[in-house]
Image: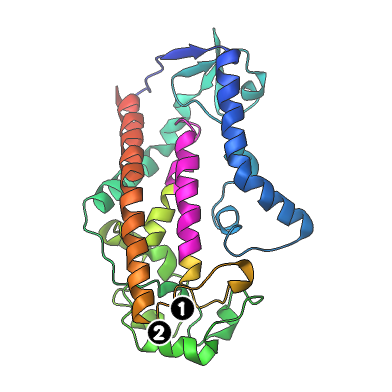
Amino acid sequence: MTPDLAVREVLPRETWAPLAEAHRDRAQVWTAPHVERQHRREKHPVEDFLFEYYDLGPGRLERWHPGVGMVLADAPEYARLGAYVEVPDGVTVDPARLERRLPGLRWTRELLARTAGRPARLGCFGLHEWAMVHRDDAAVRHPQHPLRLGSEGTAQVVESHRLACTHVDAFRFFTAAAAPRNELTLTRPDQLEQEQPGCLHASMDLYKIAYRLLPFVEASVVLDTFELARDVRHVDMRASPYDLTALGLEPIRIEEPDGKAAYVRHQRAFTERAAPLRARLLRLVDDLLLGWSS
């Protein structure tokens, strides 16, 4: 099969340049403070996470892309990017590069569709972060911020609760003492069977799915999912065992009934907020797969 190379629209520079600038300005609300912290060699366990855990750097987040089929006129800066090809009216994303992405796109489509089709499970209470330090002081990832309940208190919370994590990329960081306590032993092949929309990390990972579609999709979806992921990370860490009050983050005390209820409210809100983004990504993936097979 060959990809659909049809040009949908040619954008003159006076049209696309403001779009690219607006995208960069929106992204720099988040990228500029991160870069400044890097220069000062400061760490922020919440705000820096999306740049450190995920593999999209600040400069790439700031770069706007129009998506497949859109031609940018007078765009030498895009012509220099490896994913673009020259056409008579300017440059456009090279859809032929999609070929090596096809297996991943098909897997991603399955993940998005299956996750969207499942009911949200809301009983984990964010204990994954607690399980990541359970009975293993060497596993503490943010030593500059103490554990609110200390090592023993943290362990007691884990041991007095049911662990019900469904997300493989959280489970893989569980300590050796915590992993057997989880209801499921998760491996990568389990992701298609277990991912569910109530999981905060499943909502956060929509950002990863979005940026891995670049430059074949219009880049605003990446910022939309980034902003969701950032808000999720705030709740994720407020519900963690770490004391982040020095950063102005009040804890969600999931070891107490009120904290559990608050966490579930956040889960419901994120599930609702993520649903249209997940549906949008599914449509984009379907369009790319259809374009290739047409």
Identified at 50% across, 92% down, the residue is 152
For the record, the magenta segment spans: 207-235
In the picture, the disc for residue 158 is 2
Residue 201 image-quadrant placement: bottom left
Residue 165 seen: no
Under circle 1, the secondary element is helix
Disc 1 and disc 2 in contact, CB within 8 angstroms: yes
Look at the image and name its color scheme.
Answer: rainbow
Residue lying furthest top: 88
Q: Earlier in the sequence, mark 1 or mark 2?
A: 1
Position of the N terminus, as image quadrant, is: top left
x and y percentages locating residue 238 in the rendered image: 49, 69
Under circle 2, the secondary element is helix
Q: Callout 1: few (<14), some (14-19), or many (20+) C-alpha neighbours within 10 Å?
A: many
Q: State how far apart marks 1 and 2 are (Cα).
A: 7 Å
Residue 28 image-quadrant placement: top right
Eyeballing the image, is 224 above or below 169?
Answer: above
Eyeballing the image, is 268 above or below 10?
Answer: below
Identified at 59% across, 22% down, the residue is 18
Identified at 37% across, 22% down, the residue is 2
- For disc 1, the marked residue is 130
x and y percentages locating residue 173 in the rendered image: 47, 71
Circle 2: residue type: Val
Identified at 36% across, 43% down, the residue is 277
